[in-house]
Image: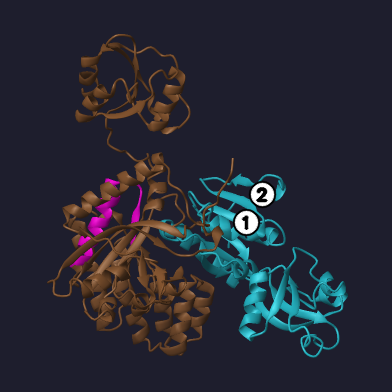
Amino acid sequence: MAQSPLHFQNLRLAVPRGNLLAPTLDLLERVGFDVGEVRANDRKLIFEVGEGRTIVTTRPSDVPTYVEYGAADAGFVGKDVLLEHRRNVYELLDLGYGACRVVYATPEGRAPEEEELRPLGVMRVASRYPNITRNYFERLGKQVEVIELHGSIELAPQVDLAESIVDLTSSGETLRQNSLVERAEIARCSARLIANRVSHKLKAGLIDELVRRLEELTVE
Amino acid sequence: MKITPIPPGTKDVLPAEAAELRHLRQSIRDVFDSFGYGEVITPTLETEAALETAGEKRFRNSFRLFDERGEVLVLRPEMTTPIARVVATRMADREPPIRLCYFAGAFSPISPQRGRQSEFRQAGLELIGLGEPAVDAEVLAVLCRALDACGLVDYSVGLGEASFFRALLESAGVSGESRDEIFAALVERDMVRLSAAVASLDAAADDKTAIMDVIALRGGSEVLRRAQDLVRGPRMEAALKRLARTYYLVSRYGLADRILFDLGMFRNFDYYTGIVFEVYSGDLGFPIGGGGRYDGLLARFGRPAPAVGFAIGLDRLHIAVTGQGGVRAAVRPSVALIGGLEPELDLANQLRDSGVAVYALPAGIDEAAALALAADAGSMWLAVPAGGSDFRLIRLPARAQAEPGTPGGAGGRLGPVLKREDLVRELTA
């Protein structure tokens, strides 16, 4: 059944560029947003989509920042980003897509934290998620040196930059290609709808309606 | 130029900003005065023991230092605890109600990118000793009137009731770990985690629905009606009645339009026992202030008493007011007087005695430089000696007063020439 168009006056949404862009736009289209221009133009950053509604496209890890400061009322972002940055925002809905896991992985063979590291006492972990990594090992009571990288984390153990990594995986293929073995799952992640603290109150009707419509679609 | 940094999360306030903050403070103070709230000034440093008495986990994250005996001192993270201490000790035999207010800085270390200051200026009040809705209504009315007096136009006060939700959990038989998990999810504002926690509860299906419904319940006065359907048991009934009564009394102050009900508002569970509220303003992504009823705190200091209060973040209020027409400070006549140090010292004093602010400039200063200095100082006029007892009076453009260093094109503009004795009359007119 066709959805009637929504009337989201004065609502600004932050949408991440990258993997989550296409499924997010699909979803927004189905709740009545005209996202044609967002799809077509990958240089523009801010789009008027009618009736005072605006979409801004940002780097994925910046979405919670825009929303926390109220530069966007609501946004779409991976749970991994929320766990890493711990912004003060409402996390309203698990949208289901963009499913992946944050895992702890080490090279094939014996786990390195055992014998080999005894003389040194500290294991090096490469990750683009320094906070998630630190929290995880703190909970386990293990002391690690976190080496922050911004891409190709799998390379680190192969060039002896680190003994292990903490990274995202969906199929596990990249890990296998680089002779890495998953040792533990740290978190399960998927795309989330988040909202600004004040917008959640002052634009309660609009936000609740958006949540309700998205919920209907993601439950299907 | 040598740059000497200041600690992260702090800032220097220069005269133009300080003048506006002072005006905001004064506007708020006038309203607090009109309700009879007496100001208290407490030490910036408290003993760690005093803060531990409050039993607040969040205080663990505070600036600490040692005194010369090795005792741990804490830079106060807020003002409510010091006031509870004062009321229980210095005012122990004072009959309630006790109405106190404060204008003070508070401190809390922050990670830099959070859009928060580690030293923040607050204006707030506490009303101690009475627990009825009429008292809650007064406090909400003082809050709104203070914001109105500051020139804030577009704002709402989100209003919730902490005991309503607590009573619901109780009646649904939620306790122990599952209750902790629900509170933890609410503190994180993580509704995904919350709905998972609620779904896994060992409770009746309609209790679970009611829990989720209460959290989402916010809006206008219709919320009170909708909440009525969720009432289970006398404690929820009583909490809702209190809230409705408070709202009725707030409407008697003419402020019903400001209230936005929000039964899902959670500010610090262990602390608030009744109403909770936050101030929201249009474009600002953070609450400007907030507060609530905390009937348990005073007992920890040995003097059990109900209490309610709020704090306004002055820096955030300043941002919001600036975005809504700016701070409208009362204008006092002011003049920059060339030669006001000498030889026109007598004239400068005569003007000051008549209520005109005089910014004295050295004699013989270049007129363009004098205009720039007068603008920096926020003077309305520049008086230039024009031979004998004559003075040329130049009006500075209003905008230039706010923008230091730009004479705003006023340079060289000729003003009326006045005699010394007429200058006083002209400026005080």
Are callouts 1 and 2 both on one chain?
Answer: yes
Kindly identify the amino acid type of the residue bearing the numbered disc 2: Val
Residue found 37% across the figure and 51% down from its top = B317
> Circle 1: is it few (<14), some (14-19), or many (20+) Cα within 10 Å?
many
Residues B249 and B285: in front is B285
List x then y, in percent, for residue B236: 28, 79
Query: Which chain identifier belongs to the brown chain?
Result: B
On the rendered image, what quadrant is the N terminus of chain A found in? bottom right
Q: Quick check: B149 above or below B231?
A: above
Residue under the point 79% across and 76% down:
A172
Q: Is residue B18 left or right of residue B143?
A: right
For badge 1, the amino acid type reads: Val
Outermost residue toward the top in this view: B388
**CA distance for labels 1 and 2:** 10 Å
Residue pointed to by mark 2: A38
Residue interval drawn in magenta: B134-159
- Name the magenta segment's main secondary structure: helix
Q: For residue B99, what is the image quadrant?
A: bottom left
Where disc 2 sits, the SS reads helix
Residue A111: horizontal and vertical position, in percent?
80, 87
Asked if the magenta segment contains residue B398, the reply would be: no
* Disc on the earlier residue, 1 or 2: 1
* Chain letter for the residue marked with disc 1 in the picture: A
| Displayed quadrant of residue A107 | bottom right
The cyan-coloured chain is labelled A
Q: Quadrant of the C terminus of chain A?
A: bottom right
Label 2, residues with CA under 10 Å away: few <14, some 14-19, many ≥20? many
Residue B100 percent location from the top left of the image:
22, 63
- The residue wearing badge 1 is A15
